[in-house]
Amino acid sequence: MRISLLTCVMIVCSMASTAWSQAMPVIPEPVVAPNWQPVPIDRIEPMGWLKTEVDLLMSIVVSNKDALQTELSALDRFGSPIASNLNQANDLRSTEGSLQWLTGLVDLAILSGNPELTSLTSEAIARLRGCQEANGYLGIFPPERRYQINHVNDNLYTQALALQALLTWHDHAPDPALLLCVERTVQDAYQHFPYRQQAVPDAAHPAMTSSLAMIDVLANLYARTGKMIYQEFTRDLLHAAILHPGSVLSAFTRADGLEDGVGSVHCATLRWLAKSRSMTSDIVYLDAFQKGLVLIREHTGPAGALRGSLSNDNFTSTQELLHTWASLLTWTADLKYAEWIENLILNTFPVSLLPHSDGLFKCIENEETQGYLEQITFTSVTAPEASPVLANWTHVYPDFIRSLWCKDDQGLICAAFAPCELETSWGNRQVRIQEILDYPGDYQLRLNVQTDTACTFMVKIRKPEWARAITINQPYTIVGDFIHVEKEWREFEEISIVFAPGISSHRTDDGHRWFRFGPLVLAHPITAEEILPAGDSPGIRKFKAAPAFSYSINSTAKPARLHVSDPGDHRFSFSARRSDNNQEETIRMVPLRNTLFRQTTFPEYKH
């Protein structure tokens, strides 16, 4: 068997690290994802409904510029380290919130090109970079509190958010000094990480899991440079987290350690594990990844959102889940993640298409309602509750857009579907692809491929798992979950594909049934009544469900689509039995995205 030089180096490093790592079984080759390269978001221009969503989000952020500047003011703590006698918990939460704003703003400014957002983001990046100390430290702690056992989590987590923002901005506006700033910060953190080459003390902070956020940065730098320091630091972080019984990573490695609920940190840990797999060869992390993936999938509902969350904010957890699926798509080249991403975008996150909605919303699930889901619609960041949700909203569509197109050594990959225009290159030739579709209004996809001169490459298009059949105007082959179209492209040509959707039936773990039409989850809508007054939160519109009955169905029940002239009119009828009188009724079913309250899952009754 032929073994690469890189593999040999990795095996030697693994043997030399610690007694613990020497005892761990290793697989012969590191688990490295196929050579998928995500297309930078500034090369993808949203169109159609996607542009509507991005524009709405941008307008809300810009209209609250004063509140946004207040949020970003906490970044000044990077230049004024927190003193030991200050209210450290509040300062940390404020700083972390500001960094969540900054990372989202970087994406939104790049994506929208809005001059106000661009100026605000550029100023914040410059201010943050200017706070780096001579020794490379960039953080919020005074020297006596840096990388201490009880604070390593807070230190590395805030650093990781800041560095990821700097790296993303550097990709948009290349600046060698900015990249050097990031590398020097990581070098300082690596040199002072307290758990290098030693066991984790019993007094280690139980929330150490969040220190793994640095892996996002390390994976980014490793992909750019191939420097072994980033692999070694990743091993140290995983080593420290896996040995602490209170960490999520530790729970992922134990058969009896899985929690009943799932929060945002579980989703993020799965992402960090996946990125680590490209840099390490320890099979224990592969096993932990598989267990964590099963856990999270067991706690997602039909629309892909997390349910029964350990977090107080289900929206934040679900947004983190989207981020994780988007990362896993490019790190594993597994198209099931594209399916899960679209499920979230089309069924959980739409804003402008929601009735009653003129702003942003937050989902809160009440398990006692047995299939009902309450949504609270945010229209402003004037309310304290609205600001964190809006900060998380700034990440949603950038994460989705990063999932739309990738490259490999054969050509371009269309993984997820949304109206957009891609500008990229193949070799030294410019390529532009307009992706035109009203999906999910209808199911025809058109890719207009334009090249400046003739060139040959492959376009790989995801074959949706819900598609019953496809019709295409170009010669093609089906390879796994891909439609391959390879040819010499000359100036302007079109790929036209029609996907045939159908109604599919699915079951929850407890035996309830739910239904989809193509990618759209169906639900029985329940009338929403606005609560007036809204109480102490003027920026929030609140609704409650009108009096309603739950329904059960027989084993053969299936929604029937109403015959309408508009293909985008997704209405269905459904025979179900009312819970109060056991009488059969014909009820409506519509896409879940068009409801505020609904029954989505239906128990079966016996004849």
Image (cartoon, helix red, strand yellow):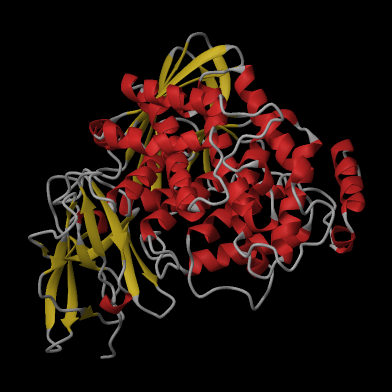
Q: Is residue 78 above or below residue 152?
A: above
Q: Residue furthest top?
A: 453
* Circle count: 0
Residue 3 visible in the snapshot: no
Residue 292 visible in the snapshot: yes
Q: Nearer the viewer, residue 479 or 176?
A: 176
Q: Nearer the viewer, residue 64 or 365?
A: 64
Quarter of the image where one finds residue 222: top right
Q: Position of residue 191 (x, y in %)?
A: 78, 41
Quadrant placement of the C terminus? bottom left
Q: Residue at x 29, y 90 (%)?
A: 606
Q: Residue at x 36, y 56 (%)?
A: 315
Q: Nearer the viewer, residue 26 or 457?
A: 26
Relative to 600, is 544 on the left or the right? left
Q: Is residue 224 above or below residue 263?
A: above
Q: Residue at x 25, y 36 (%)?
A: 60
Q: Nearer the viewer, residue 130 or 432?
A: 130
Q: Position of residue 411 (x, y in %)?
A: 58, 28
Q: Residue furthest front?
A: 85
Q: Is residue 334 above or below residue 25?
A: above
Q: Position of residue 97 (x, y in %)?
A: 43, 45
Q: Position of residue 574 (x, y in %)?
A: 18, 70
Quarter of the image where one finds residue 307: bottom left
